[in-house]
Amino acid sequence: MTITNHILAGSIIGLTVSNPVLAIVLGFISHFIMDILPHFGYPGKNGYVVFKHRLMKLVSVTTFITSAAVVILLAVTGNWFALLVGLIAASPDGIGFYNYLKNERKQLPSTGILGTFHVKFHRWIQWCERPWGIGVEVAVSAALFYVMWLSI
């Protein structure tokens, strides 16, 4: 899933779950549940390598803009805890980007937590990353934004 969808799902959890510890845990777990769904991407380890494709560029720019808009909306409305949970929900993708910069870009093996958590587990659950998954992303994003809007 795109960062936008992870932030939206996490923010909904932050807005609706009254126990803060539970909200943070559920926000983090929501990332992996969402990544099980078919979504936009390219199969294998080449997500960042295929950035040269027009569709990847379009999705990346759109994701940046929509993520920033959600962050700004939550900040302006004073929903700081929802924003925090949203960012926690998106955080596992930061590990993937770090792994790419540290290892994959240089064609080095991922070891330790990066090898176990990101490569073996996180990629494994993302069984269906395909370009056509953009349709799933847009539908999920619209539904999540609507629910978040109602929850603010």
Image: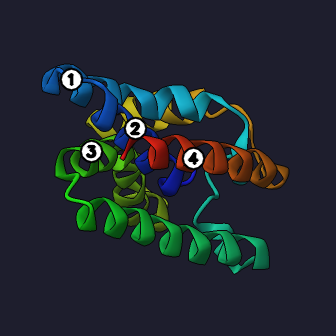
- Local packing at callout 3 (Cα closer than 10 Å; few below 14, some 14-19, many 20+) is many
Cα distance, mark 3 to mark 4?
15 Å
Residue highlighted by disc 3? 82
Label 3: state its secondary structure.
Answer: helix
| Residue at (57, 35) in percent of width and height | 35
Distance from Cα at disc 3 to Cα at disc 1: 11 Å
C-alpha span from label 4 to label 2: 10 Å
CB contact under 8 Å: marks 3 and 2? yes
Q: Which mark is residue 18?
A: 1
Q: How far apart are marks 1 and 4 (CA)?
A: 20 Å
What amino acid does circle 3 point to? Ala
Q: Which amino acid does label 1 sit on?
A: Ser
Q: Residues within 10 Å of mark 2 (few under 14, many from 20)?
A: many
Residue identified by numbered label 2: 12
| Mark earlier in primary sequence (3, 1) | 1
Q: Of marks 2 and 1, which one's residue comes earlier in the chain?
A: 2
| Residue occupying image coordinates x 18% and y 52% | 80
